[in-house]
Image (spheres, rainbow, N blue to C red):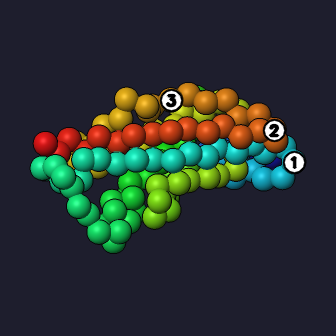
Amino acid sequence: MPLTRRDLAIAVAALVVLAGPIIAFSLLEKTGQDSGYLEGTVTIGPLCPVEPCQVSPDVLAEAYEARKIVVTAVGSPLPGKVLDLDTTGSFVTSLAPGTYTVDINRIGIDRSPDVPKTVEIRPGEQVRLEIHIDTGLR
């Protein structure tokens, strides 16, 4: 039985729906000579409602663990790549060349004047960001 135009249209639509996330994911995950890098450091504060603020390294590590960096390809309708921070607030990832929006996951009333920010990733180059997260504690 030959395929009708309707059957062909359904098959193409299904392919687009199934392949779209794979294509977008591969753009974000591409590594090798053609990739570029996004790296940076996040500072978080205040972590106490009064100064001076004395927090243990464990509490600071938990604060960094709860925050994430979200990287989304500009124009992509798909969710972005979520980056963890290490215990000092640093992050790094490789990305395919392109234009990306970098933001934070905004826990509670967290805010930052540094993001969202649009960055251009070029092959073999590094883009570095310094992001301060204001927790809103006063």
Mark 3 lies on a secondary structure that is strand
Query: Marks 2/3: CA distance?
Result: 19 Å
- For this view, does 98 lie left or right of residue 68? right
Mark 1 lies on a secondary structure that is loop
Question: Which x, y percent locates residue 107?
Answer: 29, 49
The amino acid beneath tag 2 is Pro
Upstream in the sequence, badge 1 or badge 3? Answer: 1
* Mark number displayed over residue 33: 1
Judging by the rendered image, the residue that carries numbered circle 3 is 117
User: Residues at badges 1 and 2 in contact (C-beta under 8 Å)?
Assistant: yes
* Mark number displayed over residue 123: 2
Query: Marks 1/2: CA distance?
Result: 7 Å
The amino acid beneath tag 1 is Gln
Nearest the camera: 29 or 136?
136
The residue lying furthest to the right in this view is 33
Q: Residue at x 21, y 55 (%)?
A: 53
- For this view, does 109 lie left or right of residue 10? left
The amino acid beneath tag 3 is Lys
How many neighbours does mark 2 have within 10 angstroms: few (below 14), some (14-19), or many (20 or more)?
some
Query: Marks 1/3: CA distance?
Result: 25 Å
Question: Which x, y percent locates residue 30?
Answer: 75, 50
How many neighbours does mark 1 have within 10 angstroms: few (below 14), some (14-19), or many (20 or more)?
few
Mark 2 lies on a secondary structure that is loop
Nearest the camera: 55 or 35?
55
- For this view, does 18 lie left or right of residue 87? right
